[in-house]
Amino acid sequence: MENQKKFTSFSPVVRRVISKRVFLSAIIAALCVLLANTLAIRNPQKIVFAKSANHNLSPLTKKVLGSLTNDVRVVVLFDKQSDLFDPVRNLLIEYERISANLKLEFIDLARDPARAEEVQQELRLPANAPNNRILFSAQERVKIVNDSELSILDFSEFMDKRVARRTHFVGEKLFTSAIVAVNEGTQTKVGFVTGHSEHKASDQGGQWGYSKFALMLQQKGFLLQEVSLSGTNSIPADCRLLIIPGPRTPYGSSELNKLSEYLEIGGNLFTLFNFYSLQRPCGLEAFLKRYGFEIGINQVSDSKNEQSGKSGILLVDDLGSHPITKPILGSRLQVVLPRSIGYSKPNEGTDDPPPITILANSSESSQAIIQTQDKKGAIEKEGKIPLMAAKIHANESQPPARIIVTGDSLFLGNSAFEAGANRDFASLAVNWLLERTHLLDIEPRAVTEYRINLSSAEMNSITWVLLLLLPGGTLGIGLLWWQRQMKR
């Protein structure tokens, strides 16, 4: 009698309500699956799952954050749809968790441009910069980190696929450097030598302008100044780094003596040569020979690493394990018609290592060409040829001098500055020259990618499964359940 009541209570009205609910649920489930797979099918060849970098901070960063006594304002001007937004946000939230003096604000450039413009006006910055960036400010100083600086890219497949893959995220190194820069008591002075047709920090031209390099130095918090060595002019006593950017006319003996005196008191020198001075050596070749460098009066060609369609542009991937180049191993420098930069070998019979470290080499397919009197050119050397080198020169009663010499100056010009790892090399070189080695010690964070490569047949099979089998199966189960309820 009790069972009979249960069955009779399943009236036609209740059955109709249940039927409508089951049918509606099946329709909604099918639509959800269809929409999800329509979005997923937009990439029919490859699915990439990227794991964000681990955000456990280095001991150095924790020390810097723990020592903050002034408030540091950090404004993240970023499109939230950017691939780099999540790593930047997660890392800076960890910074904020450790230091109460870090004041963090996120502004979506796409949704709140008015607030972005207001903040930039407060910090006295131009408001028309379109790229994603992070602003660090303290004590009326501002340091900018652009999104283009945050990644180390792998160009190993660039020649074939025209795609550069992000391998490392270097946010921690740049953010900690920015916090140190805006909290420094005095600005470090960096000098650009003028008077010999060099690149100029104020020149915004393409190949010869150095304004992008200069802007990077200013964003690091350095104070830039032009330095002339002619006449009675001297190198300022508070100049920590002297840059000689591609001279094309000869130096006088008095000018070279001033450079020698500068190095003897622990000054740091960044000298860049180029092929324009081959016909008329500038005198720095003989000067640097005193410090063990061998500057080639030649032009290096590399048939293996020459960029496709651009004669004279080399993609250099043979980088040394020096602190300058170690963080960018696996990347490429883009150089233009470089000269060779070698070193004097130690005396035979000694076990002393060479005092100069090679930073970059060409490939085994290289040739160094010198011009003969008939201007036809002759092969001076073949095989792997050094293109950049660095040295710490010891002084008897003064701090050591740090020297970097490169066979190309055009790779830091505005046209090539953002190519390959050129910007990263410039930043790392300056940090090393100014003995900011603590910033070199923060390791880049690896970005791991998981790739599933599918053939066309496999992709078609998966498409039919997702679009038909899953929705059909869901609908079928719903109908079976409804039919069972009807029978009861």
Image (tube, rainbow, N blue to C red):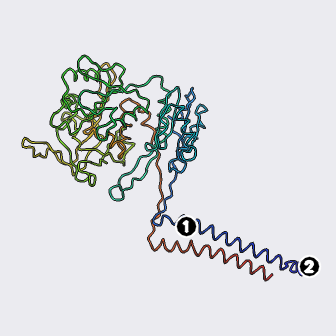
**Picture mark count:** 2
Residue 97: x and y in percent read 60, 38
Comparing labels 1 and 2, the label whose residue is closer to the camera: 1
**Is residue 46 shown left or right of residue 303?**
right
Q: Position of residue 129 (x, y in %)?
A: 46, 40
Q: Is residue 35 left or right of residue 347?
A: right
* Amino acid bearing label 1: Thr
CA–CA distance in space, label 1 to label 2:
51 Å
Q: Which of 288 and 110 lies nearest the eye of the viewer?
A: 110
Q: Is residue 326 above or below residue 39?
A: above
Q: Which mark is residue 38?
A: 1
Using the rendered view, name the quadrant where residue 247 is placed.
top left
Q: Which is nearer the eye, 108 or 173?
A: 108
Q: Residues within 10 Å of mark 2 (few under 14, many from 20)?
A: few
Q: Earlier in the sequence, mark 1 or mark 2?
A: 2
Mark 1 residue crowding within 10 angstroms, few (<14) / some (14–19) / many (20+): some
- Pick the quarter of the image with the N terminus: bottom right
Q: Is residue 88 above or below residue 184?
A: below
- The residue carrying mark 2 is 2
Element at label 1: helix
Residue type (three-letter) at the residue carrying disc 2: Glu
Label annotation for residue 302: none
Q: Residue at x 14, y 42 (%)?
A: 370
1 and 2 marks in contact (CB < 8 Å): no
